[in-house]
Image: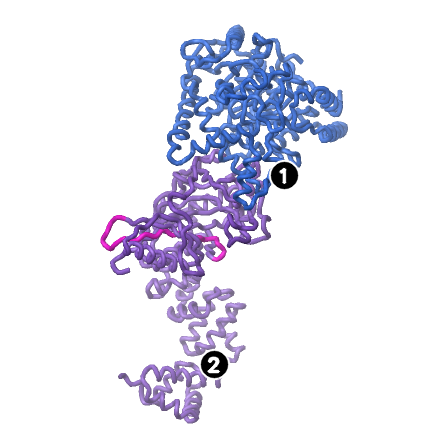
Chain colours: A purple, B blue
Amino acid sequence: MEGWETVIGLEVHAELATATKLFSGARNEFGGDPNTHIDPVSLGLPGSLPVLNEKAVELAIRVGLALNCRVQPSEFARKNYFYPDMPKGFQISQYDQPINGEGWLELPDGRRIGIERAHLEEDTGKSTHVGGGGRIHEANYSLVDYNRAGVPLIEIVGMPDLRCAEDARAYVAELRAILVAIGASDGKMEEGSMRVDCNVSVRPVGVEELGTRCEVKNINSLRSLGRAIEYEARRQVDLLTSGRRIEQQTRHWNEEDGRTHKLRSKEEAFDYRYFPEPDLVPVVPSQEWIDEIRSAMPMLPRERRSRLAGAAGVQTGAAALTVERGLDDLAVDSIGRGADAARVLVHIENNLADGHGALTADSFAALVAMETGRDLTATQAKTVLADLVESGGDPAAIAATHGFEAMDTSLIEELVDDLIARHPDDWAAFVDGDEKERKKKSGFFVGQIMKSTRGQADGRVVNQILDRRAGGPARQD
Amino acid sequence: MSTGAGGMALAMAAAVRSGERSARSVVEEHLAVIAGREDEIHAFNLVAGDAALERADLLDRSIGAGDDPGPLAGVPVALKDNMCVRGVPTTCSSRILEGWRPPYDATVVEHLSAAGAVVIGKTNMDEFAMGSSTENSAFGITRNPLDATRVPGGSSGGSAAAVAAGFAPLALGSDTGGSIRQPAALCGVVGVKPTYGAVSRYGLVAFASSLDQIGPFATSVADAALLLEVIAGHDPLDSTSIPAAAPDLLGVLGRGVEGLRIGIIEELSGSGPRSLEGIAPDVQARLAEAAAALEAAGATVEQTSVPFTVYGLSAYYVIAPAEASSNLARYDGVRYGLRVEAGNAVDMNTATRTAGFGDEVKRRIMLGTYALSAGYYDAYYGKSQKVRTLIIEDFLRAYESYDLLLSPTAPTTAFPIGAKTADPMLMYLNDVCTIPSNLAGHPSMSVPFGVGDDGMPVGVQVLAPANSEPTMFRAAAVLEAAAGGGAS
């Protein structure tokens, strides 16, 4: 790929977290028995008419504001094509007048990726084609579930500003974090509530003009997004370097074989015959409403990362995981109560993957203080933390019920000496080994001590004793 | 009631409400008329005799208990077969809806129920309301009760014929390009297309959504006013519904036209250099007499030009098929109605639509699909929308000088069955006078005014600005009185 540049633009569909569908009162909820979240409008029954869900408009405006878009008067249009899971034979979408015009998204490293538009549309149902490889034309029969039909979607169309798979993944991850943070969507790619279509083209480095693009569909995870982009870019470069041309196509990512496959060419593309949806009136949100939505917007991940980074005295990158887990309020508050920032972030990374449960900033700060004051070892602190998450309470009291107290250093020294005596070969390897070998052996010795003290010894103290006994730290070769 | 003109439905409801006669006797009487002539006329796709009698008994019991069922107590109403009634087959006179029973009531049906009306049947129509003679029904033609060799007009021909034949004193139709007013004119009854958005479209099977509007048929202006008052009003289930209460019409019927300024649309009058051709001389003559009657009642009447109305027909035959091509896409055999089995879902879809739709419907789906296609959109759909805007502006300009406008409803009286079926363009021309109101979204109505050389009724069309139904009905009442109609 030397000498080539990949150009990527993403179209992300996210289901909006409303209680009901975009144009009717049927439930918007993942799962459920097939065809249970339906009503005359979701089924497109004759005579039924759409009525716009105001909450969906509000969430769409939130998305627009979070992506720095121009929120503007908009209209719905009909996108016409036949498919069994599309009950009306058309999808109600927005075409030339989307609710959100141009904006941008800032990646964690500060680069801005342009947003072309973010518009409202309804989702389709789900088809299952049984037999014939799952294709509609060859299937023995087809089943349709309309539970998803009419669920509100926001389609966020990005500019072709991304240049590599890694950036594309960062973009989607950040977009997902934003959507979750503002309550617009649950962003679950695995449940299909967030879906990514990817436009890829390549061009020789230094060339301004964009190459012919292909759109890749059926990307169901961040991992497959990266793989699909890399495969597709490689495919295009191979074609061009062997003197052939790129045909504009829609392609299908196949997770199993790790390749993209042609769905249709530009000539075979559907003519959607868009025209203004006559059953709906234009959406003209008042400035007062937009201001009201803006003032109620929660802090965005970008702002939360820099807030935490400021409080913890670290780079925003180190704060990212904490924000992603939604534990930045806890971290900032705990650090504000005097807890050691590094210990706080370590606990969040290692011990709070499933959230903070009943743990409060007060008890978290108290626990970390006990740990840094050597009243608890790291292992003990982890045990107490788990209890706090489970049921809350006072860390000192919980430590007492576990019988945790800092062990006397002299007692640990005795145990270490005893251990050395019983394992002379390991000890020799520790003393004479290089840094790598010593680390391996220290792991063994610390592990043994921890085992015999049931975690009550402080690992740092054990290491200090080992170093002292060996006559200093590892030799530097 | 402040009008001099009587109303058959008004009198019926008054008698039922006062206990003077039972709802059952009213319904039985109409079922007897239907039994006597329906085989010949074929106004109905379905006569709901048992359900109507059951409903009448329920009303009679509630009246006996001292309740007032409402302004249409015991009055039979015929519904065009494109309006949904829970559990009752709704066919749009198309095979493609075979076997479908809606799980809900149209908003107008709820209004009728709340007013004490009795739905007596579902009336025949041109398939999906596409036609001007009710000859495009999949279930056979409807005949004009005044001369069974002639058409009743369309597409709401069954509703017009039902009222004209005395099968029901009231009926509802839908009007996309004249489908209430033209059959009203051809059958000699009153027919109203209200302002777009005045009556909810929820539960009306769509033909062309931006043009469709439900409205009443009646034997008198007063009865039409009564029915419109019942069905109009804001509906949150229809986003295009006007957020206002139903207008008071019965209260203003007797106010006359003294001081009103009324313009005859030269382009649609048949006379004058700007007029379209094809308006029959006898129709022109009745229009002139109607104008004279309004003048005699104190209005100022003069000819005026509304130039873009002549392009209405062309614009309509792009916009309406375009919307229809999309609205009718849902009939794919997957969820309801006809399904013709085939090897897979795609082939099943094609087979179903091929078998389920009639020729006129297919013609319009193709027209509309073409007009919306990439590369043709601007030339057809885009251009037609511009013409539509010009027509609206034209009307608004005219209404700066006039309170109401006047034209014939249809170019001719009812024509013989089969006379225009071979030539779609000839059939389309029937709606040349009525289409401009649909494009503008303005109300207009047809009032019977004398007969043509063939003895068949002529309708005069009164047009009004948006939401000016009260003024429109005042003029209609004057015309009715002058024509000697509205007898009760």
Picture layout, residue A250 above or below residue B48 = below
Figure quadrant of the C terminus of chain A: bottom left
Quadrant position of residue B227: top right
- Residue A366 inside the magenta-drawn segment: no
Q: Amino acid at mark 2?
A: Gly
Read off the residue under disc 1: B103
For this view, does B36 lie left or right of residue A427? right
| Residue A110 visible in rendering | no
Please state the chain letter of the residue tagged with numbered disc 1 in the rendered image: B
Is A102 on the left or on the right of B372, as rendered? left
The answer to the question of whether label 2 and label 1 lie on touching residues, with beta carbons closer than 8 A, is no
- Residue A176 lies, in percent from the top left, at 42, 55
* Residue appearing at x 39%, y 38% in the figure: A96
What segment is highlighted magenta in the picture?
A: A190-209
For mark 2, name the chain: A
Residue A442 placed where, x, y %?
39, 84
Q: Which residue is mark 2?
A: A455
Front label number (2 vs 1)? 1
**Could you say where residue A428 lies in the image, as x and y percent from the top left?**
36, 91
Q: CA distance from mark 2 to mark 1?
A: 68 Å
Amino acid at dot 1 = Pro
Q: Residue at x 67, y 22 (%)?
A: B168
Q: Residues within 10 Å of mark 1 (few under 14, many from 20)?
A: few
